Image (tube, helix red, strand yellow):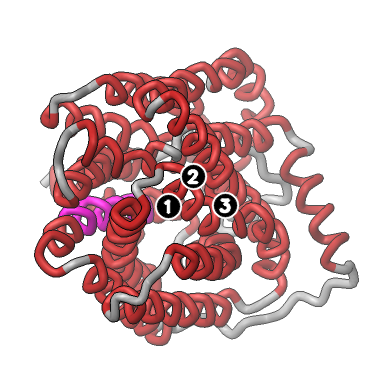
């Protein structure tokens, strides 16, 4: 019975009907997304044999998030997030059908890939911040919010575990176009889940301030308190130095491990398995307390795993190291997300999460372009080893300042009832379902 109870606690956010719909719809769609990502990487490398162009495609797909993310956060706080997501998911489906048609008719050229990637990146610039803020509306109990965020990571990485290996097999059998077409069709699942939700009527908050003033207010709120600033910086550094490893994987699969598209799929699947394990590790936690220390250990694990992977020429060892890198990456990212979502004010949630999305998605294209350029000069092995080293040392300032940051958030944890010693007293004395007037992170 104890095991069943623990399992129920691990998936407690699924008791909310709207969140369950969101979880299923997004889960199906994300499998297609990962299939398209593998297919597109393999297609570009097959057409061009250029590591630089692999980085350029990633850059074009993610740089709009860097440029548009903060403004998207303002819109996420002003407009109906449900309707915004319906629009962004529909446009993403149109992009996938267009790309699939070009590949299946064998008329695809690299400029098509760059243009359509930039179009999808623009859509994602609005979609990511809105989706991050929308999740909170779907969970009926505030205390289940951290579990919902961890389950989101689980969903993302269950898709990454399934999508790439399927894509690798399909590419070898029928080509890249079918993978992209499956992704286009998979958007019907998420659109259906959004339409089936029963949501409270949207009440637009009348704000006198203009967009630019709201944006500046969001920056002041996010960067004016050191713990929130530290979390966003950690995500930015991990994205800048760590995320380029996905860009270099096709080169490792074909030229170093001497495999094909299925090898790339297995490597990404192993990373997804590690990330899924990390997300489930977070889902079984009942409190955000102590996540600051977890971030330090998992950032170091991620960096060291990348360094070791860069020198591996054995397929089995490479799979194992991808598993560790996936675990370290997702636990670090999701821990930062969980801390931010737990404490942020609802009226500023979209703007803060847009800064998280900008750090996560926006810094990756810069890192991808840099990694692609450096790899052309010194090789992918040394480039990835350097990325891993920079990830490992970039967490040092956070580790040194963690005691001070911990002291700054202690009053917030006490007010939210997170600190175990006083949680029961606070729960009876205050209404924890209301949003705290001030929010901070660890």
**Residue at position x 39%, y 37% from top?**
245
Q: Is residue 90 left or right of residue 307?
A: right
- SS under mark 3: helix
Instruction: Name the mark on residue 107.
Output: none
Q: Residue at x 72, y 62 (%)?
A: 71
On the image, the x and y values in percent for residue 155 come to: 30, 57
How dense is the environment of label 1, judged by Cα within 10 Å: few (below 14), some, or many (20 and up)?
Answer: many
**Residue 435 lies in the magenta stretch:** no
Dot 3 crowding, Cα within 10 Å, few <14, some 14–19, many 20+: many
**Which residue position is annotated with label 3?**
357
Residue at image mark 1: 149
> Mark 3 or mark 1, which is nearer to you?
3
Q: Nearer the viewer, mark 2 or mark 3?
A: 3
Residue 61, how many percent across, how many down?
Answer: 51, 59
Q: Nearer the viewer, residue 341 or 155?
A: 155
Determine whether 183 is above or below 380 in the image. Answer: below
Q: Earlier in the sequence, mark 2 or mark 3?
A: 2
Q: Are marks 2 and 3 in contact (CB under 8 Å)?
A: no
- Pick out the residue farthest to the top: 400
Q: Quadrant of residue 250?
A: top left
CB within 8 Å, label 1 to label 2: yes
Determine whether the residue tagged by mark 1 lies in a helix, strand or loop: helix
Could you tell me how far apart the alpha carbons at marks 1 and 2 are, in whole angstroms?
6 Å
Q: Residues within 10 Å of mark 2 (few under 14, many from 20)?
A: many
| Horizontal relation, residue 228 to residue 168: left or right | right
Overall secondary structure of the magenta section: helix
Which residue has dot 2 on it?
338
Closer to the chain start, of discs 3 and 1, is 1
Q: Residue at x 47, y 52 (%)?
A: 58
Mark 1 / mark 2, whichever is N-terminal: 1
Residue that appears at 64% across and 37% down: 412
């Amino acid at each position: 019975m104890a095991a069943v109870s623990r399992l129920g606690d691990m998936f407690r956010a699924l008791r909310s009907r709207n969140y369950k719909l969101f979880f299923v719809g997004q889960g199906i769609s994300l499998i297609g997304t990962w299939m398209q990502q593998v297919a597109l990487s393999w297609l570009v490398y097959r057409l061009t044999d250029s590591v630089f162009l692999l980085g350029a495609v990633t850059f074009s797909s993610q740089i709009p998030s860097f440029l548009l993310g903060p403004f998207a956060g303002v819109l996420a706080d002003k407009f109906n997030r449900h309707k915004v997501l319906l629009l962004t998911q529909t446009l993403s489906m149109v992009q996938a059908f267009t790309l699939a048609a070009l590949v299946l008719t064998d008329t695809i050229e690299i400029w098509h890939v760059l243009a359509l990637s930039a179009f999808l990146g623009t859509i994602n610039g609005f979609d990511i911040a809105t989706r991050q803020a929308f999740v909170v509306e779907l969970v009926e109990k505030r205390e289940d919010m951290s579990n919902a965020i961890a389950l989101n990571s689980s969903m993302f990485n269950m898709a990454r575990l399934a999508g790439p290996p399927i894509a690798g097999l399909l590419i070898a059998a029928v080509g890249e176009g079918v993978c992209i077409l499956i992704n286009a069709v998979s958007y019907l699942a998420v659109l259906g889940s959004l339409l089936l939700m029963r949501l409270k009527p949207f009440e637009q908050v009348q704000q006198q301030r203009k967009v630019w003033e709201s944006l500046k207010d969001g920056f002041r709120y996010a960067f004016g308190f050191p713990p929130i600033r530290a979390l966003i910086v950690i995500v930015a550094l991990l994205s800048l130095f760590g995320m380029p490893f996905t860009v270099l994987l096709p080169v490792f699969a074909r030229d170093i491990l001497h495999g094909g598209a299925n090898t790339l799929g297995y490597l990404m699947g192993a990373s997804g398995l590690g990330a899924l394990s990390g997300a489930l590790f977070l889902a079984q936690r009942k409190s955000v307390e102590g996540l600051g220390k977890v971030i330090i250990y998992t950032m170091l694990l991620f960096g060291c795993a990348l360094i070791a992977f860069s020198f591996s020429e054995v397929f089995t060892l490479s799979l194992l190291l991808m598993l560790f890198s996936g675990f370290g990456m997702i636990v670090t990212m999701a821990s930062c997300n969980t801390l931010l979502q737990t404490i942020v004010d609802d009226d500023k949630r979209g703007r803060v999460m847009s800064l998280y999305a900008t750090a996560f998605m926006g810094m990756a294209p810069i890192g991808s372009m840099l990694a692609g350029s450096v790899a052309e000069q010194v090789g992918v092995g040394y480039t990835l080893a350097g990325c891993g080293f920079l990830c490992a040392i970039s967490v040092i300032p956070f580790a040194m300042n963690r005691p001070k940051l911990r002291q700054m958030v202690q009053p917030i944890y006490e007010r939210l009832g997170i600190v175990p010693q006083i949680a029961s007293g606070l729960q009876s004395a205050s209404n924890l379902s209301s949003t705290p007037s001030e929010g901070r992170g660890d």
